[in-house]
Image (tube, helix red, strand yellow):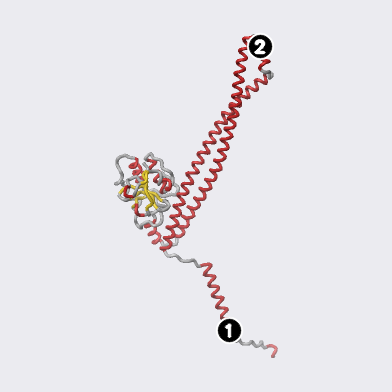
Amino acid sequence: MASHRKPRQRPLSGGTVRTAATLALAGAATATAFEGTSHAEPRQTPAQIKAEADRLYGEAEEATERYNGAKARADEAERALNGLQEEAARRADRLGAARSALGAVAAGQYRSGGLGPALQLALASDPQDYLERAALLTRAGDRTAAGVASVRRGLDEVGRLRAQADGRLAEVRARRDELARQKAVVEDRLAAAQRLLARLGAEERAAYEAQHGGTGAPGGRPGAEAPAGRDRSPAQAPADGSRAARAVAFAYGAIGKPYVWGATGPGSFDCSGLTQAAWRAAGVSLPRTTYTQINAGRRVSRDQLAPGDLVFFYSGVTHVGLYVGNGRMVHAPRPGSTVRVAPIDSMPWAGASRPA
């Protein structure tokens, strides 16, 4: 009977119990700490989310202007490449014709038996005929020599043009790579801003879009802009038919059209695309980017502004609008908004210029 009894277990001592409890608590705390590290994200307040979204939109606008500059340089390099290739093709065609003419001369000499000029003249039966043929052969020899020299020059010129085209091709590829990099930066910043704003509640996001959606960059004054469908009448625009008046009229006509980064119209615009298109409608060619447009005309101070002037904002000169008078401008703010009227004090001032 004793053999079927369970072995007697020794009770745990007080020290052993305390040790086990301590280990258990430590393990639980460690597990909680790891769980918090792997799953919990620091929560941002709505104000922090909005501020971060503003910063990302500002960086996207800076990258947009860099993209615009890269695109302008890429387009210029491609135009130069096409011009070199077309000129090389024209020279090659002319070279081919010259070489064909020389080939015909060579073939004729071969058919004539390859007789030298002296022997051919010696075979002439009439002295007068001899003299006439001598003059003709001399002139023919001169023309042949000139033709050979022309072909040699043509070969050199075609080679030079093709070498230049190869150099331009390398530049075009580099410009396209730069363009792709800037495009990726813009898209990354815009996507990050949208992900941040998605954390806001519906009412908070609607309020953000209403207050900040038209500023085009961080720091815009809440509620500063006119709604897209209003203020279409250019009451402050000059009515004298000047270039400035035509530029202002174009800008008012663009109100309500969407902002699309990299766009120059007619259905959508970015900020510098709008000002470029407005002045192009007035017969004035402006460069593509904000940081080149500010130097495209005569600089004017804020107290000298007149309708049609370009007004620039932020320390990096990353935003531009078209002044329309009474302290207001028409501008293309940022993705998600439309061309609209806004006060010029809604963003940090950088300067102004007058294109005409």
Q: For residue 159, which quarter of the picture?
A: top right
Q: Nearer the viewer, residue 40 or 118?
A: 118
SS class, disc 2? loop
- The Cα–Cα distance between marks 1 and 2, rounded to whole angstroms, is 136 Å
Name the residue: 65% across, 22% down: 107
SS class, disc 1? helix
Number of residues whose C-alpha sits closer than 10 Å to that of mark 2, classed few (under 14), some (14–19) or many (20 or more): few
Q: Mark 1: which amino acid?
A: Val
Q: Which residue is mark 1?
A: 17
Vertical arrangement, residue 11 with respect to residue 24, above or below: below
Q: Nearer the viewer, residue 314 or 340?
A: 314
In the shown orientation, is residue 356 left or right of residue 36? Answer: left
In the shown orientation, is residue 98 left or right of residue 297? Answer: right
Q: Earlier in the sequence, mark 1 or mark 2?
A: 1
Residue 92 screen position, x and y as percent? 57, 31
Residue 118 screen position, x and y as percent? 67, 16
Vertical arrangement, residue 147 with respect to residue 191, above or below: above
Verify CB contact (< 8 Å) between mark 1 and mark 2. Answer: no
